[in-house]
Amino acid sequence: MAQKDTAQRILDAAEALFSEKGFAETSLRNITTKAGVNLAAVNYHFGSKKSLIQAVFARYLTPFSEQFSEQLDIIEQRENTPEQLLKLLVLTLNKSGLENPEKFGVFMRLLGLAYSQGQGHLRKFLTSEYGEVFSRYMKEVNRVTPELTPMERFWRIHFMLGAAVFTMSSVDSLLAMANHDLGTESDVKDVVSQLMPFLASGLMSNVKND
Amino acid sequence: MAQKDTAQRILDAAEALFSEKGFAETSLRNITTKAGVNLAAVNYHFGSKKSLIQAVFARYLTPFSEQFSEQLDIIEQRENTPEQLLKLLVLTLNKSGLENPEKFGVFMRLLGLAYSQGQGHLRKFLTSEYGEVFSRYMKEVNRVTPELTPMERFWRIHFMLGAAVFTMSSVDSLLAMANHDLGTESDVKDVVSQLMPFLASGLMSNVKND
DNA sequence: AAGCGTTTAAAACGTATGTTTGAATTTTAC
DNA sequence: GTAAAATTCAAACATACGTTTTAAACGCTT
C-alpha cells in the first residue's frame, strides 16, 4: 500500500459524516477532505459513492452477523425468555467491536438512516447479505412468544425496532438534554438498561406471564 | 388567482415527494414537474426551498396544534389515565384533517424526516412555532405517571415516540409486507390499535397499576 | 376597455456534485 | 536495481441543483 491506509481513513470519515448528516447531504469532497486523501481515492478504492455507503455498513455488520450467527447456534438448542433474546442482541453488539458507546451510537444512527433514507441499493444489499441471520433470529422470537398472533408479533417487533433505532440514533443529544434538564449523569449503558425492560414489557403486553 | 391554486399544488406535490424521498433527494424540478407549474413558482410563492419545507409542515401542524390546544384545555381540568393521554393524540390527529389514513402516513413520515434529516432550520421552526403546546402535553404526562422517576419518564416518552414515528413512517410498506406474509388485510387503523397498548404497556412497565 | 399589480413562463446564471482522465509517484516483485 | 504494478494527485468533465432574471399573460378595479 502507498502510505498508511487510505481506504480505512475514507471509511472512518464517511461513517462519521454519514451518521451526522445523512448520505445525500454528505459529499465525496467532504469525506476526502476530512480523511485527508485525494478526491479520486474514493472512486479508486470503492468504485462509487453507493459502494462506499455499502462498505461502511459492511464493516460493522459483517463482524456483527458472524458473532450473531455463532450466538444463534447456541440459543437455538435451548429454551429462552424474551429478555434473553433481547440481551443476546446487546451482548453480540458488545462482542463485535461495538463495545465503545460512541461507536455504538454511530452504528445505530446509520441503521436508522438505512431505514429512513433507504436508497434502494442499500436495502437490497443488506437483505441479500444479512437477511438469513435475521430470519434465524426471528424464528427464535416466534418460539418465545407463542401467545402472540403472527400479526401481533410482527407489529410489536417493529415497534421495538423503532423505539431502539430512533432513540439510539440521537442518543448523544438526548443524553445531553436529559442530563442537563434533570441534573443527572447518565450514559449510553443506562439508556440501554432502561430500554430493555420497556421493550420486553411492550412485547409481552396483555400476556399473562407468571 | 391566475388559474387554480399554484401554491397549493406545489405543497401537495412537495409533501408527497418529501415523504417518499426526503428533503435533499427531492429537487424543486421534481416538485414543479409533478405539480405542473413553472420552476420559478416555488421561489415566487415561498421564497426558497427551506421556506417551502416549513410551509409543508405548517399546513399540517398549525391546524393540529390548534385542535390539540383546545383538547388540552379540557383534559387539564380533570384526572386522566395514560391510555387517555395517548388516545387524545390520535383523536386530535383525526380531528385536524388527518382522518384519511393515507394523509396520516404521509404526516408521520414527514415527522420522522424532521428528526432524522433535521436541517436545523426545521428544528428551530418547529420548536419556536409549536413548542409551547408540546410542553403543556408533557405536563399532563407527568401528572399521570407519578410513579416514574423523571429519568424513566424522559426515556420512556422517547422510546414511545420512536416506536410511533419509526413504524408509522413506513406504515405503507410495512402493511404491504405484513398483509403479504401473513395473508391478512390490515390497515393503518389496525396498526394504531396495536400500537397504543404496546406504548401504554412500555410506559407503565414495572408499575403496579391495579 | 385601460391600467396596474399579480402571477406565470422560458432561459440563463453560478455553484456543487459524482465521476473520469492521464500523468506523477510510490510500492512491490524479481 | 530496475521494471511493473499499484496508488496518488491535480485537473477537468458532464450533470444537476437552487436561484435569479426578464418579459409575457392574466385578473381585478375603475
Image (spheres, coloured by chain):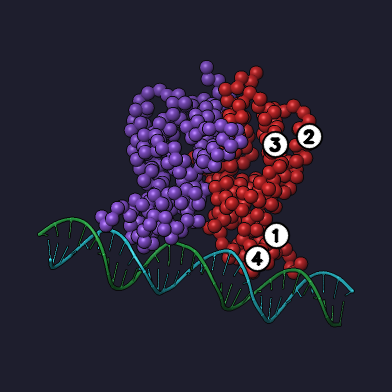
Chain colours: A red, B purple, C cyan, D green
> Which amino acid is tagged 3?
Tyr
At mark 3, the secondary structure is helix
Taking the view exactly as shown, the residue that stands out farthest to the top is B210
Q: Earlier in the sequence, mark 3 or mark 2?
A: 2
Residue type (three-letter) at the residue carrying disc 1: Gln
Q: Amino acid at mark 2?
A: Ile
Disc 3 or 1, which lies upstream in sequence? 1
Q: Which residue is mark 2?
A: A74
Three-letter amino acid code at the position of disc 4: Asn
State left or right for residue A209 relative to residue D22: right
- Spatial separation of the CA atoms under disc 4 and disc 1: 14 Å
Q: Is residue A99 visible?
A: no
Q: State how far apart marks 1 and 2 are (Cα).
A: 33 Å
Residue A137 is tagged as: 3
Q: Which residue is mark 4?
A: A43
Query: Going from the N terminus, do you reach mark 2 or mark 4 first?
Result: 4
